[in-house]
Image (cartoon, grey):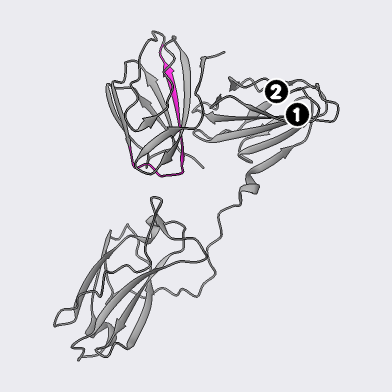
């Protein structure tokens, strides 16, 4: 079974992959710096990224996130992006992400 | 790490062990290599022999067994005399909650026990859901669900676990052309393949309120 962490966006974030494999992040501000530690190679990690009613918050994926898609800027939208951990504490996107307006 | 110590003369009830040595090894059941955070652990724990001082005191550090995957590992502590002959081998389990262990005061572990149960096979998480006009996918029963359409139907889900990934295999029968309405809580799903024997595969991630979000575009197979 997988574990989920619900987090609020902050300008600088360091995620701990030893605490969960799915990260549900609500955006009330943009993330200008994000990193992740304690990755396990071969594990799948998913990100559910939610804009608030204002929207237009941005996410600057850090250097250890490869091939991730942009965050949907629309208000109340939900962007989902999944990665696989690879050696070297790097996450590689396994598929293009999806996005939709919440409630649709 | 946990710290383990002992005094040979007490453990062996032997007063004269001028050149005794101690070796520590990590053991497990089955063919899986013991791992810590995904990294393999060597069976030989100590780099050379553990230092034993002139009064027989020794100390070493090991990874707690409850931090090691798969479950069921244990350590062996081997004591050799000055001829290199083994005079005692005992097994121990060291848990992270204790922190330090004194081998003079704890009982060895008996490894001659049934191995721990294996993790469920992946097939156990594959559920075949029978056809109905309103099928319920109970997400507590599996991680992958196969559903064959013999008519039109509207899906429903229950008991999703936040953070889990769920994959649906929606299959058309020999007639094909059946409609499948994804459960209302499934967002951004791919329209299903309507071809005869067409298969649509779609994976979702579950959020905290048991809504499922597609993690990528679905795929079609014939």
Number of residue marks: 2
Q: Looking at the figure, which quarter contains the N terminus of chain B?
A: bottom left
Figure quadrant of residue A8: top left
Q: Looking at the figure, which quarter contains the C terminus of chain B?
A: top right
- Residue B135 at x, y percent in the picture: 73, 29
- Residue A15 at x, y percent in the picture: 33, 33
| Circle 2/circle 1 CB separation < 8 Å | yes
**Residue visible at 71% across and 36% down in the picture:** B146
Q: Secondary structure at mark 1?
A: loop
Examine the structure image and report whether residue B41 is included in the region drawn in magenta.
no
- Residue B188 at x, y percent in the picture: 58, 19
To which residue does mark 2 refer? Answer: B192
In the visual, does A37 lie left or right of A67? left
Q: Which mark is residue A89?
A: none
Question: Same subunit under labels 2 and 1?
Answer: yes
Quick check: B10 above or below B69?
below
Q: Point out the frontmost of discs 2 and 1.
A: 1
To which residue does mark 1 refer? Answer: B198
- Residue B180 at x, y percent in the picture: 73, 22
Quick check: B30 above or below A75?
below
Disc 1: which chain?
B
Between residue B16 and residue A36, name the one nearer to us.
A36
The mark that comes first in sequence, 2 or 1, is 2
Q: Secondary structure at mark 2?
A: loop
Disc 2: which chain?
B
**Residue visible at 42% across and 25% down in the picture:** A68
Label 2 vs label 1: CA separation? Answer: 8 Å
Quick check: B124 above or below B188?
below
In the visual, does A40 lie left or right of B20? right
Which residue range is magenta in the image? A37-52
Quick check: B200 above or below B105?
above
């Amino acid at each position: 079974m997988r574990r989920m962490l619900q987090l609020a966006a902050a300008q600088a974030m360091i995620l701990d992959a030893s605490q969960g494999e799915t990260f549900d992040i609500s955006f009330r501000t943009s993330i200008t710096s994000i990193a992740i530690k304690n990755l396990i190679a071969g594990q799948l990690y998913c990100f559910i990224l939610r804009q608030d009613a204002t929207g237009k918050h941005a996410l600057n994926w850090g250097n250890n996130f490869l091939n991730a898609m942009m965050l949907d800027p629309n208000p109340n939208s939900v962007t989902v992006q999944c990665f696989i951990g690879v050696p070297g504490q790097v996450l590689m996107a396994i598929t293009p992400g999806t996005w939709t307006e919440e409630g649709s | 790490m946990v710290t383990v110590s002992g005094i040979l003369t007490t453990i062996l009830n032997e007063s004269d062990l001028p050149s005794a040595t101690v070796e520590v090894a990590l053991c497990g059941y089955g063919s899986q290599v013991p791992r810590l955070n995904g990294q393999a652990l060597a069976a030989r724990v100590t780099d050379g022999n553990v230092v034993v001082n002139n009064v027989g005191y020794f100390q070493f550090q090991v990874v707690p067994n409850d931090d090691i995957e798969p479950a069921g590992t244990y350590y062996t502590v081997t004591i050799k005399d000055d001829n290199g002959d083994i005079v005692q081998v005992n097994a121990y389990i060291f848990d992270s909650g204790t922190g330090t262990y004194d081998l003079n005061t704890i009982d060895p572990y008996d490894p001659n026990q049934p191995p721990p149960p294996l993790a469920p096979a992946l097939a156990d998480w594959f559920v075949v859901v029978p056809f109905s006009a309103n099928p319920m996918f109970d997400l507590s029963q599996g991680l992958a669900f196969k559903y064959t359409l013999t008519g039109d139907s509207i899906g429903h889900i229950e008991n999703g676990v936040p953070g889990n990934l769920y994959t649906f295999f929606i299959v058309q029968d020999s007639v094909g052309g059946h409609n499948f309405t994804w459960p209302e809580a499934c967002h951004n799903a791919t329209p299903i393949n309507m071809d005869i024997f067409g298969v649509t595969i779609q994976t979702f991630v579950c959020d905290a309120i048991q809504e499922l979000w597609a993690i990528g575009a679905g795929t079609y197979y014939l």
